[in-house]
Image: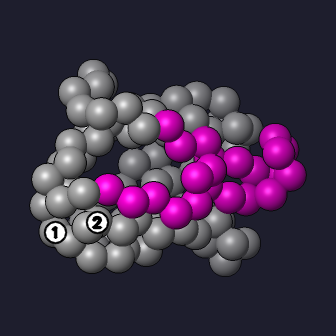
Amino acid sequence: SEATGKAFAVVMQDQGGSGAYIFDPKNMEFNNGDTISFELSSETEFHSFTVEELGIDFEVDGGTSEIFTFTFDKPGTYSLICIPHETLGMVGTITVK
């Protein structure tokens, strides 16, 4: 897909790459009304970038990247998870001011 907002890169790390299941960055902060084009890059495994409360659920195959654009219109702090690796600590937060 095409980037249409402010670019923001997130690396989805894993044991086959950096050695730990984490989002980099883990915690993100945006302003209400921001339109962000996320570039999600997965190291070696399948990951998801999921924020259930905001209806965000994108999947990225190992070794690939995906771009999606989202406009934040609801202030609050939301849980970010990788569905297959949540129990292994692949979690974060998105705060909308």
Q: Which residues are magenta?
A: 9-30
Residue 20, percent across and down?
80, 57
Residue 65, percent across and down?
52, 30
In this view, 69 is above or below 77: above
Residue position marked by numbered label 2 in the rendering: 96
Residue 26, percent across and down?
58, 60
Residue position marked by numbered label 1 in the rendering: 74
Check residue 20 in the rendering and tell me which mark sits there, or answer none: none
First in sequence: mark 1 or mark 2? Answer: 1
Residue type (three-letter) at the residue carrying disc 2 = Val
Mark 2, Cα crowd under 10 Å, few <14 / some 14-19 / many 20+, is: some
Quadrant in which the C terminus appears: bottom left
Q: Please tell me which residue is depicted at 35% across the width and 76% down the height of the picture.
A: 77
What secondary structure is found at the residue carrying circle 2?
A: strand
Quick check: is 93 in the magenta stretch?
A: no
Mark 1, Cα crowd under 10 Å, few <14 / some 14-19 / many 20+, is: few
Residue 79 seen by the camera? yes
In this view, 75 is above or below 72: below
Question: Mark 1 and 2 residues: CB-CB less than 8 Å, in contact?
Answer: yes
Q: Please tell me which residue is depicted at 69% across the width and 72% down the height of the picture.
A: 89
